[in-house]
Image: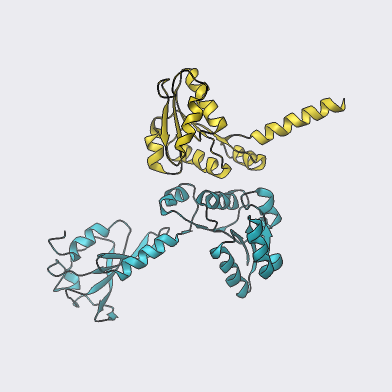
Chain colours: A cyan, B yellow
Amino acid sequence: MYVLIAGGGKVGWNLTRELLSKGHEVTLLESTRDRYLTIEQELEHQVQYGDATELWVLERAGIQRADLVIAVTGDDEDNMLICQMAKEKYLCERIIARVNNPRNREWFELLGVAPTVSATDLILRLIEHEVPSYGLVHLLDLRDERLEIIEVEVAEGSPAAGVQVSQVVLPEGVLIISILRDGAGFVPKADSMINAGDEVLLVLDPGLEDAITAQFASPSDA
Amino acid sequence: MFVLIVGAGRVGSSAARSALASGHDVSVLDDDPLSHERLDAGQATSWEDAGGRFTVGHGIEIEALLEAGIDQADMFIACTHGDNTNLILAQIAQKKFGIKKVIARVMDPARAAWYEQQGLRTISPTRHAIEQFEVALAEGAS
């Protein structure tokens, strides 16, 4: 696979290393002269000097034959533009864009730039997972497929506490796929009991979170 | 007509003043509060007294765009110092807010040409400079 990476920061440089070690052909583009010279000592001809938002720089790097274009500069507008041109001008089938400021995610979506990766969002998700005060954790979010897996803690006194799985009132499009108790998980049957303090994994259509939270939150929080 | 201009540099502030003088409603958005001085420079009255609007904020932020009145704008001009910012802002104005008259200032003629083909109106000062030099060279050679 031929991969073109825009932006030789920590993310871009390390991505290049990893992809090269997996046997892919990679070109990294870096627009700062000093940074380019540093990277060039290690990567030699696999890094090129230039602004990846310039058409001739992209073309010199062979964007026309790239199987994957990854834009990981520190500038969201640049990442959007590189991916938009890769997709629409050079008809590259696969792109990945880095979102630096999560508030710009809406614009990436507006311009059809997907998938996107945001370090801030990833860390936020980890925090949600590690800090129990957040009731609901998104474990998996497949936007295009419209599928989510969430984890929710069963609060004392919530409608779901102390009832069988089949008795929990859930909207259409939601399924309980696992119960985590005492550090171990199991796939429940219809008559498995749900206890307060359990963590429940559910697969669902996006947008049904509120209806679900109501079943697992304590009445005072709801 | 209500014109929203993002970027109050030399070009943006001059365009803003001419639009206001032609009787349009003009709102200017720039992340540098000091850029306001450019709107006042050489004028008898301040920008606001003359009827202009000025908002401090980043054009990529939706709150700033809304505060500057993007949802009422008939025309949107993106002329910050960044080509890519202008191209993205112009598309936001077009696709998110449905503004028909959208112009982006793009220094790089190649990028300007491609986005022009995609239906975005671009103005490339570099292209104009190149053309002028070509004319001057032709005149010099004759």
Q: Quadrant of residue A72?
A: bottom right
Residue B122 is at least partly visible in this image: yes
Q: Residue at x 45, y 21 (%)?
A: B24
Above or below: residue B113 compared with residue A41:
above
Quadrant where the C terminus of chain A lies?
bottom left
Q: Quadrant of residue A50?
A: bottom right
Q: Position of residue B140 (x, y in %)?
A: 84, 27
Q: Residue furthest right?
A: B142
Q: Residue at x 87, y 25 (%)?
A: B142
| Closer to us: B63 or A109 | B63
Q: Residue at x 18, y 64 (%)?
A: A217
| Closer to us: A80 or A133 | A133
Is B9 on the left-hand or right-hand side of A55? left
Q: Position of residue A200 (x, y in %)?
A: 25, 72
Above or below: residue A75 compared with residue A162:
above
| Closer to us: A162 or B18 | B18
